[in-house]
Amino acid sequence: MVGNRPILTASVAPVLRPLIDEGVHRAVSEAIDGYMRCVDYAIVGARVLSLLTEVPYLPFAGGEVVDFVCLRD
């Protein structure tokens, strides 16, 4: 759920979900290193779901990465 709305607004058969997940993962990870590419997964996933279900999906990704650098020698 996102807020009080379901994430999937169109029904996708449960048997297809692992196949969709694998397809999206392969598309992202084979094109670029999939590590830390949440936005790319969201964009590809939304596009795939939109094509399969004929219901418009928008990508949704969030999070924050904080990197600490030591400034001392």
Image: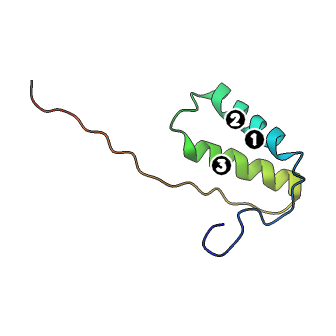
Residue 32 falls left or right of residue 12:
left
Residue 73 position by quadrant: top left
Residue 61 falls left or right of residue 31:
left
Q: Are marks 1 and 3 in contact (CB under 8 Å)?
A: no
Pointer 1 or 3: first along the chain: 1
Residue 37 position by quadrant: top right
Q: Nearer the viewer, residue 23 or 13?
A: 13
Residue 6 falls left or right of residue 13:
left
Picture disc at residue 25: 2
Residue drawn where x is 84% and y is 51% of the image? 51
Element on which disc 1 rests? helix
- Residue 16 point in image, percent of width and height: 87, 45
Element on which disc 2 rests? helix
Tell me the residue that label 3 is attached to. Answer: 43
| Label 3 packing within 10 angstroms: few (<14), some (14-19), many (20+) | some
Give the answer, above or below, for where 7 lies relative to 48. below
Give the answer, above or below, for where 28 lies relative to 7. above
Q: Are marks 2 and 3 in contact (CB under 8 Å)?
A: no
Q: Mark 2 to mark 3: distance in Å?
A: 12 Å
- Disc 1 versus disc 3: nearer the observer: 1
Element on which disc 3 rests? helix
Under mark 1, the amino acid is Asp
| Label 1 packing within 10 angstroms: few (<14), some (14-19), many (20+) | few
- Residue 42 point in image, percent of width and height: 64, 49
Residue 14 falls left or right of residue 63:
right
Q: Are marks 1 and 2 in contact (CB under 8 Å)?
A: yes
Under mark 3, the amino acid is Ile
Under mark 2, the amino acid is His
Residue found farthest to the left: 73
Residue 24 position by quadrant: top right
